[in-house]
Image (tube, rainbow, N blue to C red):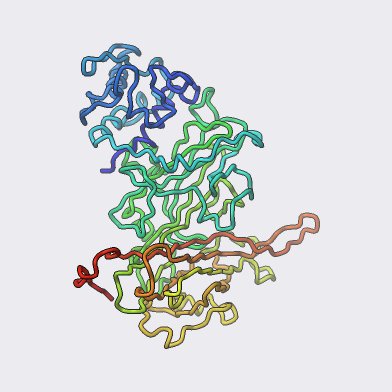
Amino acid sequence: MPNPSFYFNLFKKFQVLNHVPASTVHGSASPTGGFDLKNPAAVFGSSNRGSLLGPTTTPADSPLWAVLNSRAMGNAGFTPVNVGGVSWPTMPTGSPPAWNDFQVTAPAPKLVQVFADWIIAGKINDIPAGVIGAMPPPITSGLTPGIDLFVCSVAGDNGDRPGTVPPNFWATSLIFLVDPSTGAIVTPSSLGAASEYYLTAVIGNRGNAAAGHYMTPSAAEVQAAGWVMVWNSGTSPAVQLPALSNLDVNAIDGTYGVYFLRAGQYDVVGFRLRVQTVFDGLVKAIGASGMDLGGLTPEQWVHAEGAHLCAKVLVRKLSDPWPVLGATPFTDKRLAQKNLAPFAIDLAVVDPDPNIIWRNFVLGDVIQMAAFTGGPDEELGRHTLTVQTKLPEGVAGLFLAVPERSFARWLKKGSLGNLKRASEDELRGVKPPFPEHVILALPPGQATFEVPPLGEEFLALSIGVQYSARRLKPGPLGEISVAQHTEIPKIDRGSRCYKLERVIVGGFTWLLEGHDPFHGQDPRDMDDRRTTA
C-alpha cells in the first residue's frame, strides 16, 4: 500500500486547519507557540513546548498527533494532553470548517488516522523543496480583475501570455517528477514498471482576488488535475492520475484540492504516478484507439525500451470547465505540459558498432477541424513536424520508422520534405522498432515532413539514433527536439472569411546523455566487460 504524502496530504490540511489562510494563529507573523505552519519543515521541528513529532513510530509519542487525536475523541480545545511528561493543549479549538471536512464528517480514513499511518510508516519527509524553490516571487503589479489561474510554463511565469513562454513550452514548464521518499526532483532515464513518483507542478493566481474554499472569507473553490499520455508531439491516449490530496491513499479521484491561493501567489500541486498502473491504463487506451502500431501489441508499445510519458497539469475554478487536453499554454494558460526527458545511450554496450536505439512516439490532432470538414481547403489541419538535432560526431545517423500501412495511408511522396527512404547500405545492421515498417533517413540539423489531419486517429512513429559508443564520451551529448505545427483557420469576423495560420501545437525534447558504468575504472579491471547486441 502506498504511504500518505506528508506535504500534499497532511501539511496542506494542517495549514487550513490552523488558520494559515487567515494569517492568524500558526500562520501569523508571530505564530502561536512558535509553531509556524507557513513553513512545511516546522512539523519536523519544535514549538515552545518541545518537538512536535516523537522519537518513535508510535503515534501517541508524537505531540502533534496526540493533540489532534484528543480533539477527535471529543475533548474540548485546550484540554491538557500529556505526552512524555509534557502537557500539550488539545487542538484545534472551535470548529474550523477544515476539521469538519477532513475529520468529523469525512469517510474513513479520517485525517487523524492518516496522520497515524504516516507516523507508523516512518514519518517520511517528502517536502518537494526543489519544486517549492522553483516558484516565482509573488506578482505585485499588473494583477488582473478577479481570479486568474494558470500553470507555470516557464521559470518566472507571471501568467501573462504570450509573456516569456517560449515555443518549446513542453521543455520549460514547471512540472517535475519527484521521489516520494525524499521530495527531491528526479529525471529517470526510463520509467520502470515497479517505480512510483509524484508528478508536481507550480500553479499561480494572476488575479487581484483570492481563491480557495478555505480562505477567510471563503472564496471560489480551486481544483487541479494531472494527466499522463504516451510520448507524443501533440496529443495521444491519456490516463488521469490520482490526486495526492486524497485522504485515502488508494483513492483514484484525480481532483486535487487547492485549499487557498491568494492574489498574486503561487502553490505546488501533486499527483501519484504509479508507473505500472499508468502503463496498464495506457495499454487499454491505446487498444481502444485502434492505432496502427506496425505489428506490435499496445503492451509492447507502452513498455518499449526507454518508455517515457508526456504530462499535462490543469487548473480551474470549480465554476469553470476544465481546459481541453489538446490546448496549449498559448490558447489556455490554465494548462501546462512537460515533454522533456533524457535519452540515455549506454556506452558500455560496444557491440554492435554502430548501434541504434529507437524511441517511440505518437502524433495526433490537437485542434479538431470538424467545423470545416468538407471545405475546399485541403491545408486545414495539416501538420508539419520539424525535427531539430544537435548531435556529436559519434552519432552516425537518424531514422524515422513508420508502420507500413500508416505510411501508405498518411504519407504521400510529396509530403516527405527532406526525408527519404533509407537505402540498404544505411539500414545494414539496423534493427527496426516494429515488424511492419518503412524506415526513412533524416538529414542532420533539421528535417521536416507533413502529415494530413488525422481526425480522431493517431499516427505511431519512432525515431532511431544510430551511434558509435567508441566515439562518444559520458555526459551530455546533444538533443533532439520535435515540434508539431498545424494549419488552423483564423477568422476575420468583419469579412466573415478566414486565412490559414500555422501555429505550434506541441512537441517534445530528448536530451542525449552518454552513460558508462565503467567510466573512471582502471582498464585492467575491465577485462570482463560485457557487451550485448
Residue 156, by quadrant, is top right
User: What residue do we see at 41% from left, 32% from top?
Assistant: 12
121 or 410: which is nearer to us?
A: 121
**Quadrant (top left, top right, bottom left, bottom right) of the C terminus:** bottom left
**Quadrant (top left, top right, bottom left, bottom right) of the N terminus:** top left
Would residue 402 be visible to someone looking at this image?
Answer: no
Q: As drawn, is 352 to the left or to the right of 530? A: right
Question: Measured from the top left, where is residue 331 in percent x and y?
Answer: 61, 51
Q: Residue furthest right?
A: 495
User: What residue do we see at 42% from left, 21% from top?
Assistant: 26
User: What residue do we see at 69% from left, 71% from top?
Assistant: 376
Q: Residue furthest bottom?
A: 424
Q: Is residue 205 above or below residue 214?
A: below
Q: As drawn, is 107 to the left or to the right of 497? A: left
Query: How many numbered marks does the figure carry?
Result: 0
Q: Is residue 480 above or below residue 146?
A: below
Q: Is residue 510 above or below residue 117?
A: below
Question: Measured from the top left, where is residue 305 in percent x and y?
Answer: 34, 66
Question: Measured from the top left, where is residue 284 in percent x and y?
Answer: 37, 59
Residue 280, by quadrant, is bottom left
Q: Is residue 230 above or below residue 141?
A: below
Q: As drawn, is 370 to the left or to the right of 58? A: right
Question: Measured from the top left, where is residue 257 in percent x and y?
Answer: 45, 36
Would residue 520 be visible to someone looking at this image?
Answer: yes
